[in-house]
Image (cartoon, grey):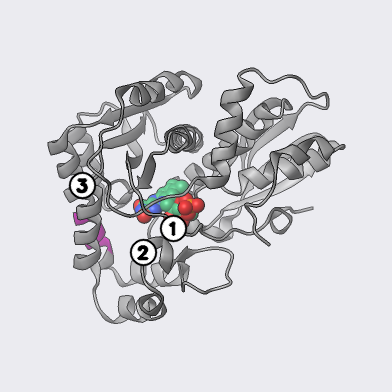
């Protein structure tokens, strides 16, 4: 079953609150997540959808603080809200943050006419096609109007600051920093073991993890990649490739906040997902690279210095135009993520 094959038209066939929430969750589960770990679980209580963190999906060596896990949950929440607004049923979001319960989203039983229906329709459709790209960008520049659009929507995400940097030298400096951090991480055997646990071959039927094709690996290499990672330190090669590809991008998008709280991270995820959707809706591609933030502390400090940031950097992606098409990464379906 292709999890991306469903039509927004059938929303009107969903009659009960529970059916509607299940339908909106089809959008939520297509969110990006660190290592494609999909660290979310859902519980439906009448017209409320509770969103839980699935602690089993923690990635302790690549994401020691859990920041990326919370950002992933923020992306998932944002998809749900965008779709709920489009279908005219969004009522309220409450961030709970008690134990594993992250948020409660209430939907409205009465379907109301959504504002900006046309715009929301495009963004909601983009949720289905959005993907994280890892190739090289073309030389085409991003129109200024699109960058300004991202600054404008910042008002919707209180406490999160976005900086967009299109300076070639800065992009190169940040790409090199990211490469250095990648190289350092691969020196650690535990980090490598963890990557192997999340890596999946090109023909795998697993519903989570990073498929070789999404890292642009041919079938044959995808089969032996875990052995290669185990036996050889591929760090220098992966670092070189990361720097090279990232450096072809046309803009850096850096999200920062004043503090390092879980609430901040969820909000960063919401804003970043919306920004990636806005850009992809306009036919741009985006690539997430968080190594300079997640690596050892010195890299995060240096990133802050290079960009002259006041706040704490939390998330980074680059953007530009890229022609390549890749298969979508897998997902668990909604039913497999609902708990009673
Ligand atoms: C918080 C977060 C951190 C991520 N970090 C990286 C990263 O450093 N490098 C990378 O190549 N992809 C990164 N990704 C992208 C995920 O691997 C990707 O979203 C996942 O494999 C699902 O694929 P999709 O986004 O194409 O649906 C990150 C995603 C999230 C949400």
Badge 1 crowding class, 10 Å Cα cut-off, few under 14, some 14 to 19, many 20 or more, is some
Q: Is 99 on the left or on the right of 255, as rendered?
A: right
Which residue occupies 29% across, 29% down? Answer: 164
- Nearer-N-terminus badge (3/1): 3
| Image position, residue 146 (x, y; %) | 37, 26
Which residue, given by chain and number where applicable, does mark 2 sit on? 216
The label on residue 247 is: 3
Say if mark 1 contacts mark 2, CB within 8 Å: yes
Ligand 1 neighbours mark 2 (CB distance < 8 Å): no
Q: Nearer the viewer, residue 148 or 7?
A: 7
Which residue, given by chain and number where applicable, does mark 1 sit on? 326
Judged by depth in the image, the label closer to the viewer, 1 or 2, is 1
- Name the magenta segment's main secondary structure: helix
What is the spatial separation of the Cα atoms under label 3 and label 2, in whole angstroms? Answer: 17 Å
Badge 3 crowding class, 10 Å Cα cut-off, few under 14, some 14 to 19, many 20 or more, is many
What is the spatial separation of the Cα atoms under label 1 and label 2, in whole angstroms? Answer: 8 Å
Which residue occupies 34% across, 70% down? Answer: 192
Q: Is 192 on the left or on the right of 300, as rendered?
A: right
Which residue occupies 25% across, 37% down? Answer: 140
| Image position, residue 149 (x, y; %) | 40, 22
Say if mark 3 contacts mark 2, CB within 8 Å: no
Label 3 sits on a secondary structure element that is: loop
Label 2 sits on a secondary structure element that is: loop
Quadrant of residue 80 in the image?
top right
Q: Is residue 241 magenta?
A: no
Q: Nearer the viewer, residue 73 or 129?
A: 129
Which residue occupies 19% across, 55% down? Answer: 180
Q: Is 267 on the left or on the right of 219, as rendered?
A: right
Q: Which residues are magenta?
A: 179-185
- Nearer-N-terminus badge (1/2): 2
């Amino acid at each position: 079953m292709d999890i991306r094959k469903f039509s927004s038209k059938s929303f009107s066939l969903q009659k009960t609150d529970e059916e509607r929430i299940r339908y909106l969750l089809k959008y939520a589960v297509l969110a990006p997540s660190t290592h494609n770990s999909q660290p979310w679980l859902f519980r439906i209580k009448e017209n409320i959808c509770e969103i839980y963190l699935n602690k089993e999906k923690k990635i302790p060596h690549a994401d020691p603080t859990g920041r990326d896990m919370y950002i992933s949950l923020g992306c998932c929440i944002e998809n749900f809200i965008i779709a709920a607004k489009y279908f005219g049923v969004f009522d309220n979001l409450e961030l709970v943050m008690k134990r594993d319960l992250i948020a409660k989203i209430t939907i409205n039983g009465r379907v109301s006419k959504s504002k900006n229906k046309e715009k929301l329709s495009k963004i909601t459709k983009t949720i289905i096609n959005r993907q994280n790209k890892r190739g090289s960008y073309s030389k085409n520049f991003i129109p200024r109007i699109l960058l300004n659009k991202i600054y404008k929507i910042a008002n919707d995400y209180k406490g999160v600051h976005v900086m967009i940097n299109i300076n070639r030298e800065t992009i190169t400096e940040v790409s090199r920093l990211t490469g250095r951090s990648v190289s350092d991480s691969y020196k650690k055997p535990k980090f490598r073991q963890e990557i192997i646990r999340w890596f999946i071959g090109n023909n795998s039927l697993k519903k989570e993890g990073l498929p070789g094709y999404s890292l642009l690996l041919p079938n044959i290499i995808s089969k032996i990649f875990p052995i290669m990672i185990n036996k050889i330190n591929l760090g220098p090669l992966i670092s070189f490739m990361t720097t090279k590809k990232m450096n072809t991008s046309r803009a850096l998008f850096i999200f920062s906040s004043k503090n390092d709280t879980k609430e901040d991270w969820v909000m960063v995820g919401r804003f970043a997902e919306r920004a990636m959707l806005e850009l992809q809706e306009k036919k741009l591609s985006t690539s997430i690279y968080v190594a300079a933030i997640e690596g050892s502390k010195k890299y995060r400090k240096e990133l802050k210095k290079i960009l002259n940031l006041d706040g704490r950097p939390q998330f980074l992606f680059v953007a530009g135009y890229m022609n390549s098409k890749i298969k979508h990464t897998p997902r668990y379906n909604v039913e497999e993520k609902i708990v009673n």
